Image (cartoon, rainbow, N blue to C red):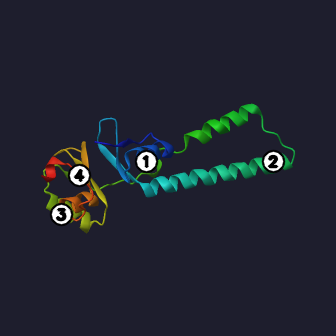
């Protein structure tokens, strides 16, 4: 199942969101256990914080230049290295995420999606937190055939 890891940054996550045309992904540890969830809202917020920090850095450099303070090449390289990395998913992912076990029926999953007012739920193996997949609100619409234009070939819905 498509997922991301806690050590990734906002640029890497945004790339995956764009490449696979998704709006949410589970965050897994090295053993594929679900530890969180990231939606496009968290990515956008993280990118906004990164942009704000960059603007603040630029203003500080300009102010220092006006005062005649110069920044050494080593300091500039350190700043550039830090700038490219962003913050890791672990810092801004949603934690304490609701999951469902793979033995639940779609009716039970639908009930959880509606009651908890969430757009997606990671599916885990019975008795573990190991990621198997994800169920989204769109999956429910497809199942109920409300979204006929969304072609979806999932044997679980056959």
User: In the depicted view, which residue is nearer to us: 68 or 152?
Assistant: 152
| Image depth: mark 2 or mark 4 in front | 4
> In terms of image quadrants, where is residue 125?
top left
Residue at (27% x, 61% y) in the render? 137
* Disc 3: CA contacts within 10 A as few (<14), some (14-19) or many (>=20): few
Res 155 label: none
Crowd class of label 2 (few under 14; some 14 to 19; many from 20; radius 10 Å): few
Q: Which residue is mark 4?
A: 152
Helix, strand, or loop for circle 3? loop
Q: How many marks?
A: 4
Q: Which mark is residue 18?
A: 1
Query: From the viewer's perspective, is the residue at label 2 or at label 3 nearer?
Result: 3
Is 85 in front, or is 18? 18
Q: Identify the residue at image location x=25%, y=46%.
A: 133
- Give the Cα separation between the discs numbered 2 and 1: 38 Å
Tell me which residue sits at (45%, 55%) in the image.
42
The residues bearing labels 2 and 3 have C-alpha atoms spaced at a distance of 61 Å
- Residue 64: numbered disc: 2
Percent x, y for residue 24? 36, 53
Q: Earlier in the sequence, mark 1 or mark 3?
A: 1
- Answer with mark 2 or mark 4, whichever residue precedes in sequence: 2
Residue 57: x and y in percent read 69, 49
Label 1: how many Cα within 10 Å (few below 14, some 14–19, many 20+): few
Q: Nearer the viewer, mark 1 or mark 4?
A: 4
Give how far apart the Cα atoms at labels 3 and 4 are.
12 Å
Residue that mark 3 sits on: 144
């Amino acid at each position: 199942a498509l997922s991301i890891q806690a050590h990734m940054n906002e640029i890497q996550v945004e790339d995956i969101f764009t490449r696979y045309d998704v709006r949410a992904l589970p965050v897994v540890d090295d053993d594929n256990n679900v530890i969180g969830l990231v939606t496009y809202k968290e990515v956008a917020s993280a990118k906004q914080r990164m942009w704000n920090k960059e603007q603040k850095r630029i203003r500080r450099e300009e102010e220092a230049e006006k005062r005649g303070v110069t920044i050494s090449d080593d300091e500039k390289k350190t700043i550039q290295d830090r700038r490219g990395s962003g913050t890791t998913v672990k810092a801004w992912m949603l934690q304490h995420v609701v999951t469902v076990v793979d033995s639940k029926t779609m009716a039970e999953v639908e009930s959880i999606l509606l009651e908890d007012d969430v757009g997606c739920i990671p599916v885990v193996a019975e008795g573990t937190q190991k990621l198997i997949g994800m169920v989204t609100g769109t999956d429910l619409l497809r199942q109920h055939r409300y979204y006929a234009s969304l072609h979806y070939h999932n044997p679980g819905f056959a």
